[in-house]
Image (cartoon, rainbow, N blue to C red):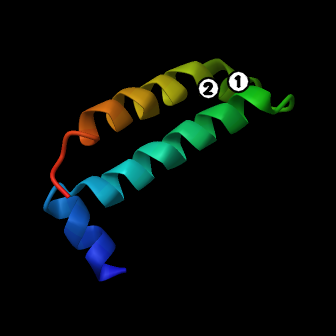
Amino acid sequence: MSSFFNGLVRLRRGPWEMVATILIAIGVFMLMQPFVIWAFTYSFIVTLIGTVMFIIVSHFPE
């Protein structure tokens, strides 16, 4: 677990890609759920932030 946080601090690709992927998954889940309207409202922006973040962190060093 400490290597995960160490990778975040050192701007390594693996941990940041995991965070971006989790954001994308949360955004898709928010889009597909029919119960909470605020989650549906913000689902696109969460997915977009995760996608842009994934594109940026894919250029980080291993």
The kind of residue tagged 2 is: Ser
Q: Which image quarter is the C terminus in?
A: bottom left
Residue 59 higher or lower than 61, as above or below: above
Label 2 crowding class (10 Å Cα cut-off): few <14, some 14-19, many 20+?
Answer: many
- Residue for badge 1: 40
Query: For numbered disc 2, what is the local secondary structure?
Result: helix
- Residue for badge 2: 43
Q: Determine the residue located farthest toward the right in the rendered image.
A: 34
The kind of residue tagged 1 is: Phe
Q: Determine the residue located farthest toward the bottom in the rendered image.
A: 2
Quarter of the image for residue 58 reads top left
Horizontal placement of 60 versus 53: left or right?
left
Between 16 and 42, which is closer to the camera in this rendering?
A: 16
Horizontal placement of 29 versus 9: left or right?
right
Question: What is the distance, in whole Å, between disc 2 and disc 1 at their CAs?
Answer: 5 Å
- Identified at 34% across, 59% down, the residue is 15
Residue 9 higher or lower than 60, as above or below: below
Q: Which image quarter is the N terminus in?
A: bottom left
Query: For numbered disc 1, what is the local secondary structure?
Result: helix
- Identified at 71% across, 38% down, the residue is 29
Horizontal placement of 13 versus 44: left or right?
left
Residue 3 locus on image (x, y percent): 27, 77
Check if mark 2's residue and mark 1's residue have beta carbons within 8 Å.
Answer: yes
